[in-house]
Image: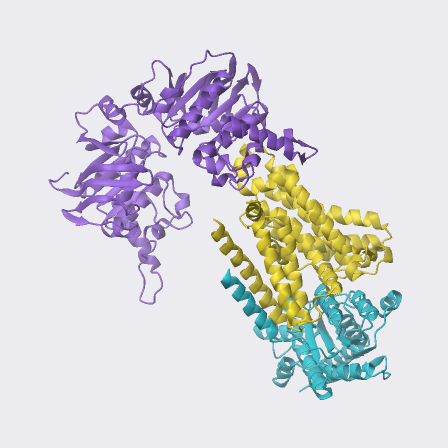
């Protein structure tokens, strides 16, 4: 019995290391913590918070798509009475009930990276302070144009999609198609989801290679999937003749580009997003006006 | 091939288990190249003695000499090192591995790299099997082999361990006639090589065919050791059973009433063969027979727990179909199983819940159980059967064996069974509780219930039955009236004699 | 004597309750936001979904089984209901449809186990994949979202200032308790888990009751799907992943033995609350999700260890 109490007390001590600060804090709620994109975002936010001397709480679900867990986190942050919530929605529509709850509690919500379904939000009577992010459609279009240019306007292309029904992936995809549609010589031979994940990117592209060994380029709607494809291509010994373009320009992707294993990636600059989120949250809390859309510039990263 | 000196001598062997003296001052010796038969009733102490030799019962008293040198056998591993191997009734092989892999399990020859030398495993195993004239391909998997072949593999494994003393516990129980012949040929080849065999079997004809000497145990004591040549079967049976009746049976005889149950040619392939009998109200019909003679299988078939291939069952003169325990209970049959904890009780349910388990429908409406009616019924049985429990809500796991057995009986009384199948009703129960259970059987019979009682205790069978059926190898070997039933006659029938 | 017998009967639940109280006290000391009515209602709401699934899981585990498919059944019944709602079906009909889909998946599990003699682990592992795949096929992989306020009221409505999901959870537990302690189904669930052979030999229709137990687990998963869908205003085909593990954890923390035959429904409720309080508290404290997983795992182990120690002491 004593031992049990002791062990619980020890547990309490562990938790106690992260004491609940009483100053009004800003919360950054991300999709997950185990994706380099979000780690960069966290880094940018932390730098800004330190500079502004704002307490910052960073939370995320264990899995990227766990909307219910993200909702619980937001509910709990409302209980904790944070001053503002910067949120990367795990689902464009699923997150709306949570935004409504924050609205009711009078806590401003700043959306990052992934847009909320604006019609649904308006219908539900919710509001967000701003959207800070890049235009994913534009990014997809830039990727498409790069592939057209590298293939000289003729070739076979495969796409690794994100999870269907998610705004981020859908916009990138639409942007990519918009570019490709203008080049009649480019044919899309396969377009399948790899659920944003690296290992699935590997497997799915390996399967595509089986059915379309003549594929010349692949566009991954994020770098994780694109990097999976890079590995699959290397394993097939085809590194020299298949172009890979990813999205997000995470560190691993930048290294792969520098090493010539990957053609290019679209840089969204998550660190900048994190910084802008905290700075604008601070401005909003001081009662200043902030624009409804704060664009974060996109660039093509290549060798 | 018997040479003059004993390989093994056991003196003053004793073994006490909590509350039971399993072995008391037993002597046993074994010559080189001899087949020495160990004979006795169930519970006479054969297995206990064999377990001492195999290191499974390290806490025995007495002296064991191997080649005249005293040894202590504390673990099965030590027994192995001393060259003692045992082949159990249930074979200890791993079905998914090959014969060769089983033979060398745990002692695989290795290459210098540390990997198993597969080739040597197979060639060594094959030469062992060939020495035994086993005719088995060492690279075949054990699950593809017949029981007899698996036994050969076990023997080969024992030989690969340099076994000099081989203990075989009922090795022929699952073999066909031809396979038995092959096994005996194998045993003879082994003894010619100087291996000594301790052979345990109930089958008289085998004992006379293969054995050289026999030691009879009874109630944990050494009765006699003698050469088999010149001994008669009747003498051996007398040695096995000759004992005074220690228990008193409070049997009350009731004039049997109308026919309650009639069975005609009930058969189940390989288990039961054309069983026919009649059971009347107020009657206790004893079923005797050795382990594996089909006693329990008969009860299970009557209760619908096992399927049957043929035969008819009549209850109160009407033919009935019993396809499941539910059907049987519907027909007023109750089955007190041999394995009380494994099949009779739900140990972590309360006394009340166990008593009412088979008749819960009566205490409930639309699935909703009336606790009051249930408790009333249960407490009635607790009083009537004098079940000693702190309360109706007590988990039955905390009750003594006798009280647990009374709970099971209550379950069947509660379900208003009029035909009761009692399988070993007093096993593992102290003397006082036994007498209570006998009295209860009297009362049930007087009330007009029909009881079929299976028991391994011959004294109980004789003391409590109005009639006795003796089973042997799935058949009814004979029927004895209460007046003519003696232990000797029953055992004689059970061993396949006339 | 009275107290002692009370402890003997409910000792396990009391231990679990003790752990919950200890945990709450610790969090109260660490965070000023923890001990408030609104936070407790918040916790109760967040716990409701897992608790409802775990109630079904408790039946299954008491019967000495396991159900790995609850999360997938939740996803499938959720998307079917959501599609029906979007096709214009009246809310009661859609809810009924959802419950029927869940119960059917559950009874498929039950039939495979009781009649097909498949081990529960295998049968429900298969169903986990089948139902997940069916949910993805049915919804074309996309979330189905946007429902009428009447439907969403199931999750955000209140009665007597307490959110509806909390009432639903309370009702589920009250009914589950009565079923488990006062009906034949409940009695047979314990009996089958304690000793299937003895139960069969007592004339109980074991196959039927096993099937009923798994159907109940499916039904409760579907009920959880209703709450989840209304809460998120969206039914996702990938919803409910790993929910089976949460439900099993709540059940085991609550003192139900994985060997079957033993367990109390309110223990499971407390177990679910322990997990909910822990997640909430760690969020309030701003602990990272990596640390959260570790802590929750540790609490599961400590709770079960504590129980084993108490048990040893009692016997």
Question: What is chain C's hue in the picture?
Answer: yellow
Residue B237 location (% of width, % of height): 26, 24
On the image, which quarter does residue A256 sit in?
bottom right
Q: Give the image location of residue A260, x and y in percent.
A: 62, 83
Quadrant, the N terminus of chain B? top left
- Say which residue appears at 31% left-offset and 46% top-offset: B56
- Compare residues B48 and C34 and report the one nearer the observer: C34
Q: Is residue B147 above or below residue C91?
A: above
Describe the colour scheme in one phrase.
Answer: by chain
Question: In x, y percent, where is residue B14?
Answer: 24, 40
Picture layout, residue C181 above or below residue C307: above
Q: Is residue B338 visible?
A: yes
Image quadrant in which you'd find residue B460: top left
Q: Position of residue B71 (x, y in %)?
A: 19, 49
Q: Is residue A56 left or right of residue B480?
A: right
Asked if residue A186 lies left or right of residue B189, the reply is right
The C terminus of chain B - image quarter? top left
Look at chain A in the picture and name its colour. cyan
**Number of numbered discs overlaid on the protein picture:** 0
Q: Residue at x 52, y 62 (%)?
A: A4
Q: Which chain is purple?
A: B
Residue B298 in view, yes or no: no
Lateral position of residue B480 relative to residue C122, left or right = left
Residue sitting at the far front: C1
Q: Nearest the camera: C288 or A191?
A: C288
Q: Residue furthest bottom?
A: A51
Q: Residue furthest left?
A: B4
Which of C7 and C266 lies nearest the eye of the viewer?
A: C7
Task: Look at the picture and state if B309 lies above or below B83.
Answer: above
Residue C294 in the figure: left or right of residue B468: right
Question: Is residue B291 shown above or below C260?
Answer: above
């Amino acid at each position: 019995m004593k031992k049990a109490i002791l062990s619980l007390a020890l547990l309490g001590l562990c938790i106690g290391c992260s004491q609940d600060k009483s100053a009004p804090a800003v919360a950054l709620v991300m999709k997950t913590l185990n994706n380099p994109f979000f780690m960069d975002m966290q880094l940018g936010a932390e730098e800004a918070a330190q500079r502004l001397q704002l307490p910052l709480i960073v939370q995320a679900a264990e899995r990227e798509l766990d909307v219910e867990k993200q909702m619980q986190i937001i509910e709990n942050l409302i209980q904790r009475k944070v001053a503002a919530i910067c949120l990367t929605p795990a689902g464009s529509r699923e997150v709306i009930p949570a935004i409504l709850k924050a609205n009711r509690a009078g806590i401003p919500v700043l959306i990052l990276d992934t847009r909320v379904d604006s019609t649904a939000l308006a219908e539900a009577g919710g509001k967000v302070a701003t959207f800070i992010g890049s235009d994913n459609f534009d990014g997809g279009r830039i990727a498409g144009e790069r592939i057209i240019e590298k293939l000289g306007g003729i070739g076979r292309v495969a796409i690794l999609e994100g999870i269907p029904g998610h705004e981020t992936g859908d916009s990138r995809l639409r942007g990519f198609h918009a570019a490709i549609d203008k080049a009649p010589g480019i044919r899309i031979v396969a377009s399948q989801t790899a659920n944003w994940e690296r290992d699935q990117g590997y497997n799915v592209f390996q399967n595509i290679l089986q059915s379309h060994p003549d594929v010349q380029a692949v566009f991954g709607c994020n770098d994780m999937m694109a990097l999976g494809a890079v590995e699959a291509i290397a394993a097939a010994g085809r590194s020299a003749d298949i172009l890979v373009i990813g999205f997000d320009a995470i560190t691993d992707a930048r290294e792969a580009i520098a090493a010539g294993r990957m053609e290019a990636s679209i840089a969204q600059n998550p660190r900048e997003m994190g910084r802008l989120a905290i700075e604008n949250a601070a401005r909003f809390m001081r009662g200043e006006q902030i624009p409804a859309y704060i664009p974060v510039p996109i660039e093509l990263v290549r060798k | 091939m018997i040479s003059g000196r004993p390989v093994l001598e056991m003196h003053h062997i004793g073994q006490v288990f909590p509350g039971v003296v399993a072995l008391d001052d037993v002597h046993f010796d074994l010559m080189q190249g001899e087949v020495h038969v160990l004979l006795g009733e169930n519970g006479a102490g054969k297995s206990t003695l064999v377990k001492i030799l195999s290191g499974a019962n390290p806490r025995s008293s007495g002296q064991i000499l191997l080649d005249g040198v005293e040894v202590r056998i504390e673990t099965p591993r030590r027994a192995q090192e001393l060259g003692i191997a045992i082949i159990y009734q249930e074979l200890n092989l791993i079905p998914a591995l090959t014969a060769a892999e089983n033979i060398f399990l745990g002692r695989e020859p290795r290459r210098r790299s540390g990997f198993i030398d597969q080739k040597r495993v197979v060639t060594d195993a094959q030469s062992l099997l060939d020495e035994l004239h086993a005719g088995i391909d060492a690279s075949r998997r054990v699950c593809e082999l017949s029981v007899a072949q698996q036994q050969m593999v076990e023997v080969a494994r024992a030989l690969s361990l340099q076994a000099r003393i081989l203990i075989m516990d009922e090795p022929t129980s699952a073999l066909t006639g031809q396979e038995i012949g092959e096994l005996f040929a194998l045993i003879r080849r082994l003894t010619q090589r100087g291996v000594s065999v301790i052979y345990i079997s109930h089958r008289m004809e085998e004992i006379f065919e293969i054995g050289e000497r026999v030691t009879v145990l009874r109630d944990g004591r050494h009765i006699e050791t003698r050469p088999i040549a010149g001994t008669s079967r009747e003498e051996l049976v007398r040695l096995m059973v000759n004992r005074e009746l220690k228990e008193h049976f409070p049997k009350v005889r009731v004039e049997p009433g109308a026919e309650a149950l009639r069975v005609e040619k009930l058969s189940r392939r390989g288990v039961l063969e054309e069983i026919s009998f009649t059971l009347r109200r107020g009657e206790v019909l004893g079923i005797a027979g050795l382990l594996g003679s089909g006693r329990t299988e008969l009860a299970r078939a009557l209760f619908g727990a096992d399927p049957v291939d043929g035969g008819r069952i009549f209850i109160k003169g009407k033919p009935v179909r019993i396809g499941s325990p539910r059907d049987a209970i519907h027909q007023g049959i109750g089955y007190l199983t041999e394995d009380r904890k494994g099949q009779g009780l739900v140990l972590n349910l309360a006394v009340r819940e166990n008593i009412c388990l088979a008749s819960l429908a009566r205490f409930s409406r639309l699935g909703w159980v009336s606790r009051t009616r249930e408790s009333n019924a249960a407490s009635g049985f607790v009083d009537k059967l004098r079940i000693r429990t702190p309360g109706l809500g007590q988990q039955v796991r905390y009750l003594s064996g006798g009280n647990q057995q009374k709970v099971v009986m209550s379950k069947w009384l509660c379900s208003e069974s009029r035909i009761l199948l009692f399988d070993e009703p007093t096993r593992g129960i102290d003397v006082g509780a036994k007498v209570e259970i006998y009295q209860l059987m009297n009362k049930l019979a007087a009330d007009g219930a029909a009881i079929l009682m299976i028991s391994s205790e011959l004294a109980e069978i004789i003391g409590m039955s109005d009639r006795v059926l003796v089973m042997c190898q799935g058949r009814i070997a004979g029927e004895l009236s209460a007046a003519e039933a003696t232990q000797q006659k029953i055992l004689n029938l059970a061993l396949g004699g006339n | 004597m009275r107290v002692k017998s009370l402890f003997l009967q409910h000792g396990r639940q009391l231990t679990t309750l003790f752990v919950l109280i200890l945990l709450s006290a610790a969090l109260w000391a660490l965070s000023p936001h923890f001990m408030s009515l609104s936070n407790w209602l918040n916790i109760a709401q967040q716990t409701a979904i897992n608790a409802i699934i775990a109630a079904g899981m408790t039946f299954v585990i008491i019967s000495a089984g396991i159900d790995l498919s609850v999360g997938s059944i939740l996803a499938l019944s959720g998307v079917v209901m959501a599609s029906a709602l979007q096709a214009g079906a009246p809310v009661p009909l859609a809810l009924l449809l959802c419950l029927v889909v869940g119960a059917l998946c559950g009874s498929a599990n039950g039939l495979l186990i009781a009649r097909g003699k498949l081990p529960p682990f295998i049968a429900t592992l298969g169903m986990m994949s089948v139902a997940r795949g069916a949910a993805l096929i049915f919804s074309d992989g996309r979330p189905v979202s946007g429902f009428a306020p009447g439907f969403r009221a199931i999750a955000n409505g209140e009665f007597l200032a307490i959110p509806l999901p909390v009432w639903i959870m309370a009702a589920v537990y009250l009914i589950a308790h009565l079923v488990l302690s006062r009906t034949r189904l409940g009695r047979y669930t314990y009996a089958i888990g304690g000793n299937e052979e003895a139960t069969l030999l007592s004339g109980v229709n074991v196959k039927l009751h096993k099937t009923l137990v798994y159907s109940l687990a499916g039904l409760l998963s579907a009920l959880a799907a209703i709450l989840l869908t209304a809460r998120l205003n969206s039914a996702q085909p990938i919803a409910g992943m790993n929910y089976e593990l949460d439900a099993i954890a709540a059940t085991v923390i609550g003192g139900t033995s994985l060997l079957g035959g033993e367990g109390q429904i309110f223990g499971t409720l407390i177990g679910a609350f322990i997990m909910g309080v822990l997640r909430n508290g760690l969020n309030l404290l701003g602990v990272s999700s990596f640390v959260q997983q570790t802590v929750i795992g540790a609490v599961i182990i400590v709770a079960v260890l504590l129980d084993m120690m108490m048990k040893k002491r009692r016997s």
